[in-house]
Image (spheres, rainbow, N blue to C red):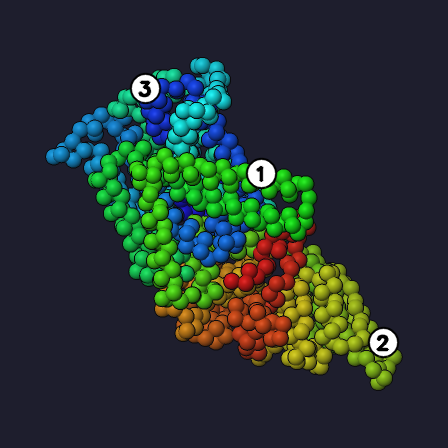
C-alpha cells in the first residue's frame, strides 16, 4: 500500500490507494499453479476445486475483516486487534513477520516485473558474463526503487493509484473479453479432488493460489484514512476490499478457465498470463496490458519499501529497535531500512534467481500466520461479547469467524507442509530471532512514555492520525449559548462574543444569574436581578438576537454547572473578572468542579489592560497539542471555528527537557500530520515547536504570534488521570491566570455536542481517552 497523504473520500479511491498488491496476484499465480497441474496429470479434476477453495477462503476472511474494521478504526487493523486481545507479544510477532513479508513482497513484485519485461524482451533470458540478464534487471530495478522511495512518500505515491486503477481495468477487460469470446464458464468443482492422492495436488494448488490473499489486511489498515464517521469509514474500507478482492476472485473464476485452455505452462519464455492476453485481446491491448503489469508491480515494490520505512519509524519510537534504523534523512524518511532491504533482495536475486514462484509460497506463508493470529483474536473478542450479551446472531458470528480462523490456520499448515524444505522453515528461525532482538532492545532502552508510544504508532501509520481524523468530522455546533452574568459591567464583556457566535449559528443566548440563598435574601434583590436580565434581553432582542432568561438561587458554581450539563447548552461564555459571583466561581476551588462537570466547552474572557484580552475574531487560533489523544479532544472545536470564521490554526508544542533527544523532531512530524489533516479540509495551519516549558511556551507564542484565541483541553496527558482530584491542569491554570487573549477550554472525556447529522459513534471515538 502506498503511503496515504490525504483523506480518502470513498471505496473506489481506497481501492486504488491500497489494492495494488492483491489486484496484481492474477498476473503471476496461474503460472506456478498450472505447472503443478501439468506435472500431476489430474488438471481437469483439480483445477476448479482449488480455485473454489481459495475463493471460499477469501469470502470467509473478508467476513472476518468486516468485524475487524468495525472494532478497530484507528488504522492498526488486525495487528491492533491482536495486540488488544493477546498483549504486547503480539506486537513483536506481528512486527517480525511483517518485516519478512515486506521483503518478500518486494522480491515477488520485482521478480514478476522482470517476468513481464522478459515476455516482451526475450533477450533478457540470456546471460552476460555468466550472470543472467534477468538478474541484472532485477538488481537495477531494486536500486531505482530504493532511490525513489528514499526521496519521500509522494515520489511513488503519485504512481500507485493510477497503476492500481489500470490493473483493475485490465482485469475487467479480461473478464469481459472472456465472456464475449467463450461465454460464462465457471471452473468445475469435483469433490473427488479432495480425496485420495488428488488431495495433495489440490492442496498444493490451493497453496499457490493463496497469494491472492496477501493484501487483504491493507484494507483494515486504511479505515482511518477515509472521511466520515467511524461507521462510515468502516463501511468505505469494506467497500474497497469488496472492489479489489471481488475483482480478483472473478478473474480467478471467469478468466482462470480461459488461461487453462489457452496458455502453455511449459513455455518458460512467456508467462501464462501474457500468453492469454495475446490470444484473448486484440492488438495493441496485450502490450498495453504488459505495461500496466510492469507499472503496478513497480509501484507495489515501492509500497513495500515504504512499509518498511514506516514500520521502522514506529518500532524506533516505541523503542523496539536501535535509533539508527529509524533515523530520518533530509527527505524526512527512514532510509537505512530501505537500503538494508535492497541489499537483502539483491543477494536473494543473485543466489536464488528471479522467478516469482521461488518466493511466492513463502510470501503467502507469512500472510497466513498473520491472518490466523487476527482470526483467533477475533474469535476471542466475539466469545467475550457473546458471554456478556448472548444471542443467536452472536453465536452464529462466533461459528463463522471460528471457521475463517480455522481455514487460515489450515492454509498456513498446508503452505508450510508444501514448502518447508524450500524456505518456509526460515519463519521458525527468523521470527523468534527478530522477536528476541526487539524484546532485548525494549528491555535495554526501557518502555517509552505513553505519549511517545502513541507518537510511534501515529507516525508509523500509512494514513493520517485516526484520532484527529475522527475529530475533524465530529460536527460540533454552538447554537445554544449560556452566558452567566453577575450584574457587573466586566461580566457583560462576554456578551460581545456570544452575539458573534449567535449571529453565525442562528443561535439562542441564555442569560443566567444566580442569587445567593439564605435568610438575608430579600424579595427586592430577586426583583432587581430579574429586571436586570430583562433589560439585557431587551437589548439583545433589539439587535435581533434570540435570548431567554434563567434566574437561579443557590451556589453560583453548582447552579451554573447544573445548567451547563443539562443538555441544552453547547457553549458557556463568561468573563473571569466580575464583581463577585462569577469572579469567585472562576478563581475558587468550586470553579474547577464546574469546569470538570461542564460537558460543553467554555470560552473564557479574562479582561486586562490589553484590548485583545476581551475580543476575538477567531482569526488566529493557537492550539497546543502534546501528542496524546487527550489533547486532540479540542480538535472538533478547532475545525468548526476555523472553518466557520476562516481562521488560521497555529499548532504548537513546547517539549520538556525530560523527553528523549529526538522528541522535538518527532513531535514536529506529528504536528505536520495534524496540519495535513486540517489542510485537507481547507484550513490553513502552521506548526511551531517552542523550546520553553509548556505554559510559558503557550503564553509566549500567543503574545508573539498575536493570536486572538487559545484553544486547549483543561488537562494535558499528565493530569488527565488525576482529574478526579486535580480539576484543572497546571498548564491550563497558568494560561488562564496570565493569558492576554480569550481562552477556549474543553474538558477531557466530555461528549461533543453534535450537529443533528452527526453519528454518535464518531463523537465517542473523537473524545474517548484510550489510556495509553
Is the residue marked by circle 3 packed among few (<14), some (14-19), or many (20+) residues within 10 Å? Answer: some
Residue 545 spot, x, y in % from top left: 73, 61
Q: Which residue is mark 1?
A: 400
Image-quadrant location for residue 209: top left
The CA distance from mark 1 to mark 2 is 70 Å
Q: Quadrant of the N terminus?
A: top left
* SS type, badge 2: helix
Residue 341 spot, x, y in % from top left: 29, 48
Q: Can you say whether 720 is above or below 68 in the image?
A: below
The CA distance from mark 3 to mark 1 is 39 Å
Is the residue marked by circle 2 packed among few (<14), some (14-19), or many (20+) residues within 10 Å? Answer: few
- Residue displayed at 51% across by 41% down: 405
Mark toward the start of the polypeptide (2 vs 3): 3
Q: Nearer the viewer, residue 499 or 81?
A: 81
Residue, far left: 129
Mark toward the start of the polypeptide (3 vs 1): 3
Residue 687 spot, x, y in % from top left: 44, 62
Which mark identifies residue 227? none
Q: Which residue is mark 3?
A: 264
Q: Cβ–Cβ below 8 Å for labels 2 and 3?
A: no
- Residue displayed at 63% across by 39% down: 396
Amino acid at each position: 500500500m502506498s503511503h496515504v497523504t490525504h483523506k480518502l473520500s470513498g471505496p473506489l479511491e481506497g481501492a486504488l490507494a491500497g489494492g495494488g498488491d492483491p489486484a496484481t496476484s492474477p498476473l503471476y499465480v496461474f503460472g506456478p499453479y498450472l505447472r503443478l497441474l501439468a506435472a500431476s496429470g489430474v488438471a481437469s479434476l483439480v483445477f476448479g476445486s482449488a480455485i473454489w477453495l481459495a475463493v471460499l477462503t477469501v469470502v470467509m476472511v473478508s467476513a472476518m475483516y468486516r468485524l475487524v474494521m468495525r472494532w478497530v478504526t484507528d488504522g492498526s487493523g488486525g495487528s491492533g486487534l491482536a495486540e488488544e486481545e493477546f498483549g504486547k507479544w503480539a506486537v513483536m510477532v506481528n512486527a517480525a513477520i511483517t518485516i519478512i513479508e515486506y521483503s518478500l513482497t518486494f522480491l515477488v513484485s520485482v521478480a514478476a516485473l522482470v517476468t513481464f519485461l522478459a515476455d516482451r524482451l526475450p533477450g533478457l533470458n540470456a546471460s552476460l558474463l555468466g550472470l543472467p540478464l534477468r538478474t541484472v534487471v532485477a538488481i537495477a530495478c531494486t536500486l531505482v526503487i530504493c532511490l525513489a522511495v528514499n526521496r519521500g512518500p509522494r515520489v511513488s505515491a503519485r504512481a500507485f493509484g493510477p497503476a492500481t486503477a489500470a490493473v483493475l481495468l485490465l482485469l475487467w477487460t479480461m473478464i469481459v473479453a472472456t465472456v464475449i469470446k467463450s461465454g460464462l464458464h465457471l471452473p468445475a468443482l469435483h469433490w473427488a479432488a479432495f480425496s485420495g492422492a488428488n488431495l495433495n495436488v489440490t492442496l498444493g494448488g490451493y497453496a499457490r493460489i493463496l497469494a491472492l490473499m496477501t493484501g487483504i489486511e491493507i484494507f483494515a489498515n486504511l479505515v482511518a484514512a477515509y472521511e466520515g464517521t467511524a461507521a462510515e469509514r468502516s463501511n468505505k474500507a469494506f467497500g474497497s476490499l469488496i472492489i479489489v478482492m471481488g475483482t480478483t476472485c472473478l478473474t480467478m473464476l471467469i478468466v482462470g478457465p480461459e488461461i487453462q485452455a489457452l496458455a502453455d505452462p511449459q513455455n518458460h519464455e512467456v508467462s501464462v498470463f501474457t500468453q492469454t492476453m495475446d490470444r484473448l485481446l486484440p492488438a495493441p491491448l496485450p502490450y498495453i496490458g504488459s505495461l500496466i503489469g510492469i507499472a503496478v508491480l513497480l509501484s507495489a515494490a515501492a509500497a513495500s519499501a515504504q512499509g518498511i520505512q514506516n514500520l521502522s519509524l514506529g518500532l524506533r519510537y516505541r523503542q523496539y529497535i536501535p535509533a539508527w534504523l529509524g533515523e530520518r534523512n533530509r527527505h524526512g524518511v527512514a532510509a537505512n531500512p530501505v537500503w538494508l532491504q535492497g541489499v537483502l533482495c539483491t543477494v536473494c536475486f543473485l543466489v536464488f534467481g528471479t522467478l516469482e514462484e521461488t518466493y511466492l509460497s513463502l510470501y503467502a506463508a507469512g500472510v497466513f500466520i498473520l491472518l490466523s493470529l487476527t482470526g483467533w483474536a477475533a474469535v476471542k473478542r466475539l466469545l467475550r461479547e457473546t458471554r456478556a450479551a448472548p444471542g443467536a446472531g452472536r453465536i452464529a458470528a462466533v461459528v463463522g469467524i471460528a471457521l475463517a480462523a480455522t481455514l487460515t490456520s489450515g492454509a498456513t499448515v498446508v503452505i508450510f507442509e508444501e514448502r518447508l524444505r524450500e524456505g518456509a522453515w526460515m519463519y521458525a528461525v527468523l521470527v523468534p530471532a527478530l522477536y528476541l532482538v526487539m524484546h532485548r532492545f525494549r528491555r535495554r532502552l526501557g518502555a517509552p512514555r505513553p505519549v511517545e508510544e502513541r507518537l510511534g504508532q501515529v507516525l508509523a501509520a500509512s494514513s493520517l492520525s485516526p484520532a484527529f481524523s475522527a475529530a475533524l468530522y465530529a460536527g460540533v455546533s454552538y447554537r445554544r449559548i449560556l452566558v452567566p452574568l453577575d450584574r457587573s459591567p466586566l461580566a457583560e464583556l462576554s456578551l460581545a462574543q456570544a452575539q458573534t457566535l449567535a449571529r453565525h449559528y442562528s443561535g439562542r443566548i441564555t442569560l443566567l444569574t444566580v442569587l445567593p440563598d439564605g435568610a438575608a435574601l430579600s424579595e427586592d434583590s430577586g426583583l432587581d436581578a430579574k429586571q436586570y436580565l430583562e433589560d439585557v434581553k431587551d437589548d439583545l432582542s433589539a439587535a435581533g438576537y434570540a435570548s431567554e432568561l434563567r434566574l437561579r438561587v443557590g451556589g453560583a458554581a453548582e447552579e451554573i454547572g447544573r445548567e451547563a450539563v443539562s443538555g441544552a447548552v453547547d457553549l458557556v461564555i463568561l468573563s473571569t473578572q466580575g464583581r463577585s459571583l462569577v469572579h469567585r466561581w472562576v478563581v475558587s476551588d468550586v470553579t474547577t468542579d464546574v469546569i470538570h462537570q461542564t460537558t460543553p466547552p467554555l470560552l473564557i474572557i479574562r479582561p486586562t489592560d490589553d484590548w485583545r484580552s476581551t475580543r476575538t475574531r477567531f482569526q488566529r487560533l493557537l492550539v497546543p497539542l502534546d501528542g496524546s489523544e487527550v489533547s486532540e479532544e479540542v480538535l472538533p472545536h478547532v475545525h468548526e471555528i476555523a472553518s466557520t470564521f476562516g481562521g488560521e490554526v497555529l499548532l504548537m508544542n513546547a517539549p520538556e527537557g525530560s523527553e528523549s533527544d529526538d522528541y522535538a523532531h518527532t513531535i514536529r512530524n506529528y504536528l505536520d500530520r495534524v496540519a495535513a489533516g486540517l489542510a485537507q479540509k481547507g484550513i490553513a495551519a502552521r506548526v511551531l515547536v517552542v523550546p520553553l516549558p509548556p505554559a510559558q511556551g503557550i503564553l509566549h507564542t500567543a503574545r508573539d504570534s498575536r493570536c486572538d484565541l487559545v484553544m486547549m483541553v483543561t488537562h494535558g496527558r499528565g493530569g488527565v488521570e488525576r482529574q478526579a482530584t486535580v480539576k484543572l491542569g497546571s498548564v491550563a491554570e497558568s494560561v488562564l491566570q496570565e493569558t492576554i487573549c480569550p481562552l477556549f477550554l474543553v474538558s477531557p472525556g466530555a461528549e461533543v455536542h453534535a450537529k443533528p447529522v452527526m453519528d454518535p459513534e464518531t463523537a465517542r471515538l473523537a473524545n474517548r481517552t484510550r489510556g495509553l
